Image: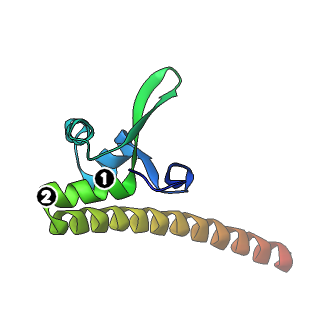
Amino acid sequence: MAEYGEWVRKGAVLSEVTAQKEYGVSRDFIVQGIQAGKLEFREGVISGNPYLRILRSQLELYIVEQFGSEYLAKAKSQTEVRAITKEIADLKKKLSALEARKAALRLAMKS
């Protein structure tokens, strides 16, 4: 059973699609966990499309039980690397925009 308030805590709940991206598990794996009673879920709907919401903590425990802790650590590392790579790309875009603005201001000051 989930801890009181866990369903409303930020980052504690994820959709099945997010679980697939972050942990590399299939929808069938998630459904098997639900049927086995290892995962609690809630149904959600966005624009008429149904999806499953599951608790991150329970999913991680189920992944460790099924695949081992090395798999979970590797999946978390890959997710973090993707997030860092994205952030670096965003910062590079911001830096180039700032450098262009700085050059434009310096040019305007010389005129």
Relative depth, front residue between 80 and 86: 80
Which residue is pictured at 44% across the width and 62% down the height? 86
83 displayed left or right of 48: left
Give x and y (percent) for residue 3. 46, 56
Give x and y (percent) for residue 103. 70, 74
**Up/down of 14 relative to 79, above or below:** above
Name the residue beneath numbered marker 1: 59
| Circle 1 crowding by C-alpha within 10 Å: few under 14, some 14–19, many from 20 | many
Relative depth, front residue between 97 and 11: 11
The tag earlier along the polypeptide, 1 or 2, is 1
Which residue is pictured at 52% across the width and 54% down the height? 4
Q: Are dots 1 and 2 in contact, CB under 8 Å?
A: no
The quarter of the displayed image where residue 82 is located = bottom left
Residue at far left of view: 67
Which residue is pictured at 26% across the width and 42% down the height? 37
55 displayed left or right of 60: right
Name the residue beneath numbered marker 2: 67
Give x and y (percent) for residue 85. 40, 66
**Up/down of 48 relative to 85, above or below:** above
Q: What distance separates the C-alpha of mark 1 from that of mark 2?
A: 12 Å
Amino acid type, callout 1 = Leu
Amino acid type, callout 2 = Phe
Relative depth, front residue between 74 and 6: 6
